[in-house]
Amino acid sequence: MKKKITVPEIMATKQNGRKLAMVTCYDYTSATLVNESEIELILVGDSLGMTMLGYEGTVGVTVDDVIHHGKSVKRGAPQTFIIGDMPFGSYNVSVEQGIINANRMFTEIGCDAIKLEGGKRSAAVIKGIVEAGIPVCGHIGLTPQTTSMMGGFKVQGKSMEAVERLLEDAKAIEEAGAFMVMVEGVPTAVTTYLKERINIPIIGIGAGADCELQGLIMQDMLGLYEWVPKFAKKYALLRQQVIDAFNTYHQEVAEGAFPTPEYSYNTKVEGLE
């Protein structure tokens, strides 16, 4: 059984060159599988809005949603480092609001850290949550909660001005006390530029190989959807396998081939005849 990684061990990857893997996860059954694997981190992401609730995006996910799914993940993956994702509207009103909701997630899920989007604009909230005793992971680049301001899900950091803004955001997150920053949807060279100028590890999602950690959406990497983003490698192709299994089951039921005696209780009941 694997040993859960710690915040200091994650931060140490900045110096020791160790590479870590993270996957999103939203339910008990999936969490048990991750827990039996060598993957070190789980993100209970607000992407559950799309993968579990059928929303078009992450906006609309609530703190209660994340807590509900997070508690089941925690039960299934006690040896895996779990990050709870703060949804839109849970921290953008005030520092106090952010601390209150981070406290709820940290205590009710029993997670090991929380994540929130935004650089400079979220620095005060990050600082407040860290000072309250909760480890925080920042999130810059492509931030799904605010894609309407970006014109959609588009690669970020494609000009030097944009890169400098990303660096300002990364430094603000670091100075606020975050132990790690997620960088999403930026060119590989930009990730390297940021990595060389900050002192906390980067977890990349569509940010190239030059990161201390990598993250993927579980449904993407398992091939449960036909379409996946460019950066999402399909490590399995489960969608068609699952559909084939459903159809085989349906056919056997329709033909009376299931259940056979092997899958039935065949105890003789005296006098029933």
Image (cartoon, grey):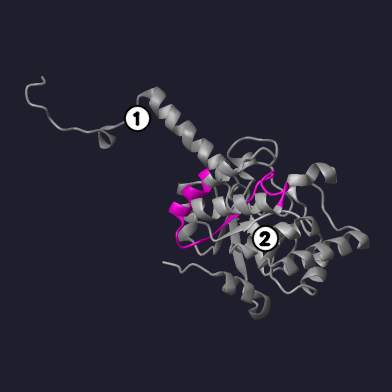
Q: Farthest residue toward the top?
A: 273
Where are the magenta residues, as a range? 68-94
- Quarter placement of the C terminus: top left
| Residue drawn where x is 68% and y is 54% of the image | 116
Q: Is residue 88 magenta?
A: yes
| Residue drawn where x is 80% and y is 62% of the image | 169
Where is 251 relative to 195, above or below?
above
Q: Secondary structure at mark 2?
A: helix
Q: Farthest residue toward the front?
A: 96
- Quarter placement of the N terminus: bottom left
Q: Disc 2 marks which amino acid?
A: Gly
The residue that disc 2 covers is: 128
Q: Disc 1 marks which amino acid?
A: Phe
| Residue drawn where x is 51% and y is 36% of the image | 244
Q: Of the residues tagged 1 and 2, which is closer to the observer? A: 2
Which of disc 2 and disc 1 is earlier in sequence?
A: 2
Front-most of residues 210 and 73: 73
Residue 167 sits in quarter: bottom right
For residue 88, side relative to residue 34 (left or right): right
Q: Farthest residue toward the bottom?
A: 16
For residue 51, side relative to residue 195 (left or right): left
State the CA–CA distance, disc 1 to disc 2: 59 Å
The residue that disc 1 covers is: 258
Front-most of residues 155 and 254: 155
Front-most of residues 188 and 156: 156
Q: Is residue 252 visible?
A: yes
Find residue 170 and report its horizontal and vertical position in percent: 78, 65
| Residue drawn where x is 86% and y is 61% of the image | 165
Front-most of residues 180 and 233: 180
Find residue 168 and report its horizontal and vertical position in percent: 83, 65
For residue 63, side relative to residue 264 (left or right): right
Find residue 214 and report its horizontal and vertical position in percent: 65, 62
